[in-house]
Amino acid sequence: MTVANMVEARCCFKLLYAIVVVLLLHMSSPCIGCSERDRQALLALKQGLVGDDGDRLLSWGREAQNKDCCQWDGVYCNNQIGHVVKLDVGDQSLQGKISPKLVHLQHLEYLNLSFNNFGWSKIPDFIGSLSNLIYLDLSDANFGGQIPNQLGNLTHLQYLDLSSDEDSVIRPENSIHAKNLNWLWRSQEFSQGGSTLLAKINGKAIPPPDLN
Ligand SMILES: *[C@@H]1O[C@H](CO)[C@@H](O)[C@H](O)[C@H]1NC(C)=O
Ligand SMILES: *[C@@H]1O[C@H](CO)[C@@H](O)[C@H](O)[C@H]1NC(C)=O
C-alpha cells in the first residue's frame, strides 16, 4: 500500500466513523415517547367508551408497533417529560363510562370531551383530581345532575365550559345544575383579585361571586 492510499483509507474511515456517530445520536434523540402509566390510562379510557364515529380512538392500540401513545390521534405529549398534556376527544360521538384511570394522566393541562353523549350521567368527581388542568371543555357532552364541588380543586383552570344544548335536555332533572358555584372561585387567584377563569354554563359566562 502506498502512503497516499493509506491516507485515503484513513480519511474514509474517519468519514464512516462520523456517519455512524451521527446515526447513533439520531436514534437516541430526546423523543422518549409516552409513559407506560399514561398509555394504560388511555387504553382504560378507550375500553370504557363506545361509538367512535370520529375514528380518533381507532389509532389507540395495544400492538407493539403502536406503543407510543404520543402518536395517537387527539393525544399530545410534552416530549421532554414523556407525559400526555393534552387530550382532545371532542366531537367523536362517544358514549359509555369514563374510566377513573383518567386521573393517572397527572400532567394533563387540556381535556376536551365536548360533543359526545354521556347519557346525562354526572360529571365524574375524579376530574377534580387532574390538578394541572388549565382547559376543561365538557360542553354538549350530555352530562347531567349536580356539578361536583371537586372541580373547585382545579386551581390552575382558566377555561371551563359546561354548556349544554338546551334542546337536548329532555327532562329538567337531567340538566346540569349547582346550588351555587362560589366554590369554583374558592381557591382561584380570584380571591386575590387576579382570576382569569372563564366559566360558562349554557353559553353564558358564570359571573364570579360578589365578594362584597
Ligand atoms: C373542544 O372540541 C370541540 C369539538 O371538536 C371544539 O369545537 C372546541 O372548540 C374544543 N374546545 C376547546 C376549549 O378547545
Ligand atoms: C377536592 O374537593 C372536595 C370537595 O370540595 C374536597 O372534599 C376534597 O378534599 C378536595 N380534594 C383535594 C385533593 O383537594
Image (spheres, rainbow, N blue to C red):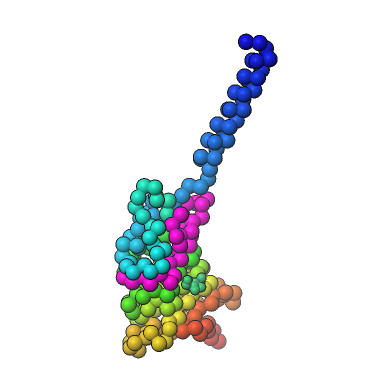
Q: Residue at x 62, y 24 (%)?
A: 12
Residue sitting nearer the eye, 16 or 107 = 16
Residue sitting nearer the eye, 192 or 94 = 94
Q: x, y percentage for residue 77?
A: 49, 56
- Relative to 137, residue 23 above or below: above
Q: Residue at x 53, y 43 (%)?
A: 29
Q: x, y percentage for residue 6?
A: 64, 15
Question: In which quadrant of the rendered image does the N terminus lie?
Answer: top right
- The tally of labels here is 0
Q: Residue at x 53, y 35 (%)?
A: 24
Residue 144 location, quadrant: bottom left
Give the residue at the far bottom of this rendering.
Answer: 172
Give the residue at the far right of this rendering.
Answer: 4
Q: Is residue 60 visible?
A: yes
Question: In which quadrant of the rendered image does the C terminus lie?
Answer: bottom right
Horizontal side of residue 112 vs 7, given as left or right: left
In this picture, which residue range is highlighted in magenta?
70-96
Horizontal side of residue 8 vs 57, given as left or right: right
- Relative to 163, residue 11 above or below: above
Q: Residue at x 39, y 47 (%)?
A: 65
Residue sitting nearer the eye, 13 or 130 = 13
Q: Is residue 140 magenta?
A: no
Q: x, y percentage for residue 122?
A: 34, 76
Q: Is residue 128 visible?
A: no
Q: x, y percentage for residue 171?
A: 33, 88
- Relative to 172, residue 26 above or below: above
